[in-house]
Image (cartoon, rainbow, N blue to C red):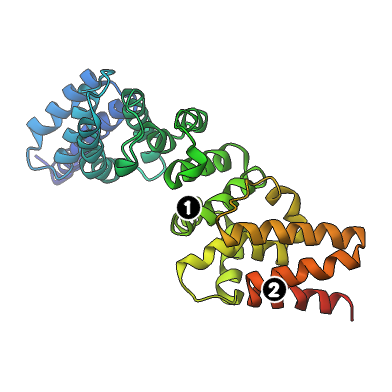
Amino acid sequence: MTMQSVQQLDIFADSRDVMLRNDVLERLQRRDATAARTALERLAGDYPDDDTLAAMTMLVHELERATTAPFADHAALASARRHLEDEVVPAARRTLSAQTVHAWLAPCWRELSARAATLAFRGTDAENHAAPLWLLAGDWAAARDAVEGIESWWRIPAPLAWMTEARYRAAGLDTAWPLLAELAWLAPVRFAALLSALGDASLDTLRRRFDAAFPGTGEVDDYAWFPAWLLVVKPALAGQLGEARVQRDRAASRATALLGEILRREHEGDQHELVSLRQAFSRMHAGLFEAYMATRNVQHR
């Protein structure tokens, strides 16, 4: 045998494992469980030590175990969710390209969402509900419908955050402002977490400005005042923020509503009423009032 022939055989041997892996990947992408299992067994038979076998086996098994059976209880959902998060998701990231991971996992989340549809919302176990799973599946309308099935969802941090994200994903930031304001007032920690999760460039810019300029304590609870501060730096948002449900038991919410009224009075030129409204606002947050008045001083120099 010539040296060239030996080299050709080496190249064939080196490329055969790649070909067999690609066969498995192609069938995984088609979500064809039977064909994927056959291709996987072929790869395992020829290359039992291949370092992709474990992850590919996990994904093939996930396709084979697909079911529409409703979950019997929240514990069953929690177990299935942990399996998906801790085992299937890492396997998908190990096996699939970064561009295709989310699309491949979406039907997995969709299956869990549908199976969880009959489980009621429990405040002590909020994440084990269909709504956040629909968000992971990328089905914003289904997430919205699931949240609307929760009584008084706008008064509860978790479903309010889910609805806010669903509205943002479906229709953009302009439509989400009222719910973002309500979430900031009700649950500043969840509000801050949602801003990070959304990855919106304009929101991130505003957050950095707020962190640098807001005269607060520097704690996460400062974000309750984000909507009021926003009216100071972007008064054009008064219309959208004015649609938020005012939470009378929260000072930051009342302050936002009061500042909205002040902006309206300024537009109308009602100077007499402005004096008393501004005094009331100054009593609610002296530092924010000073920031507001600084913008007015600049305007009237």
Q: Is residue 6 visible?
A: yes
Q: Position of residue 263 (x, y in %)?
A: 80, 60
Q: Quarter-wise, where is residue 185 in the image?
A: bottom right
| On screen, residue 17 above or below 263 | above
| On screen, residue 260 above or below 177 | below
Residue sitting nearer the eye, 108 or 300: 300
What residue would you read off at disc 2?
282
- Residue visible at 83% across and 57% down in the picture: 264
Q: Position of residue 93 (x, y in %)?
A: 29, 45
Helix, strand or loop at label 1? It is helix
Residue sitting nearer the eye, 279 or 151: 279
Mark seen at residue 194: 1
State left or right for residue 299 relative to residue 239.
right
Please, what is the three-letter code of the amino acid marked with disc 1?
Leu
Mark 1 burial class by Cα count in 10 Å: few <14, some 14-19, many 20+: some
Residue extending farthest right: 269
Of labels 2 and 1, the one closer to you: 2
Disc 2 and disc 1: Cα gap in Å? 30 Å
Helix, strand or loop at label 2? It is helix
